Image (spheres, helix red, strand yellow):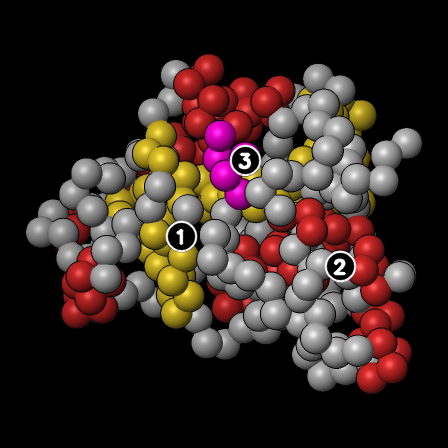
Amino acid sequence: MTDQPGTPPVIGIIGGSGIYEIAGLDNFRWQRVHSPFGTASDEVLFGELNGQQLVFLPRHGRGHRIPPSGLNFCANIDVLKRCGVTEILSLSAVGSLREDLPPGEFVLVDQFIDRTFAREKSFFGHGCVAHVSMADPTCSRLMDALEQGAGDAGIGVHRGGTYLTMEGPQFSTRAESELYRSWGCSVIGMTNMPEAKLAREAEICYATVAMVTDYDCWHEDHDDVSVEAVIKVLGDNAEKAKTLIQKTIPHLTGRTESCHAGCHNALDVAIITPPHARDPEAIARLDAVAGRVLGG
């Protein structure tokens, strides 16, 4: 046995638009997992790929039933933590804010700008306050593995870029799109915040594969893109993403030490509320997310 946080590895996959299951798993089963933070998007798919344990959650639920602002991000991440997940590969459909990131391109995001406003963004609050570092919101180790997996699969990926998370469900105005471009953003989507923040609070490594479906409305050809064309790109991206996951998993197996990027120790110096002042009910809800440091 090992006392290293985050070991042995259990790979969590959050499937975005167009990705509602993972095929080819051994010993698979769907199972409802309960959370004190509410109801997750769907049941969780447990399985193994070449002996590596995987846990899959369709972000919007099977059938794409839940809009971005309706997602219970806290429950989703808490459920994955309860399933033993140590690293999350997040798959997300996005619009492009750059000419050199055309539809079909995959971007390994390394920064976010959070423009959401109607979502619960932390597991911590009244009764137990914590502040985690988000300077580097994605795990460089996972990005290395994804880059290697993409090479093995012959899939081109662009490493690095800023993901602007908007509230939705409407798309941007042209003025907003141009503003985000002036900020240096690469892609725009509606789902990776507060997902990435909560993964950090739960001490889970996190990386995003942002899959471009179309150019955002800033682009002069945007109005010529049909719904049918977008759906086709979405389907093609989903198939490529499944291949990418299969090729990436071997690069993540066999880890016996905590993540060198510090993801598995993110709470070591984050909790501000001293033990005598912590609310027992709040602490009870945090048994999975923060049990390592709270003694749960």
Residue 245: percent from left, percent from top:
55, 28
Q: Nearer the viewer, residue 66 or 120?
A: 120
Q: Which residue is mark 3?
A: 142
Q: Residue at x 40, y 33 (%)?
A: 237
Left or right of 261: which side holds 264? right
Examine the image and state in which quarter residue 23 appears.
top right
Quick check: 25 above or below 222?
A: above
Q: Which residue is mark 1?
A: 111
Could you tell me the amino acid type at mark 3? Leu
Query: Spatial distance from mark 3 to mark 2, Cα to Cα?
Result: 20 Å
If you read the primary sequence from the N terminus, does the residue marked by circle 2 or circle 1 appear first?
Answer: 1
Residue 225: percent from left, percent from top:
20, 46
SS at mark 1?
A: strand
Examine the structure image and report whether residue 143 is included in the region drawn in magenta.
Answer: yes
Can I make out residue 53 in this image?
no
Toward the left, the furthest residue is: 220
Q: Residue at x 44, y 71 (%)?
A: 116
Examine the image and state in which quarter residue 114 appears.
bottom left
Residues shaded magenta: 139-144
Q: Which residue is mark 2?
A: 289
Examine the structure image and report whether residue 12 is included in the region drawn in magenta.
Answer: no
- Few, some or many C-alpha atoms within 10 Å of disc 3 (few <14, some 14-19, many ≥20)? many
Can I make out residue 265 in this image?
yes
Left or right of 105: which side holds 90? right
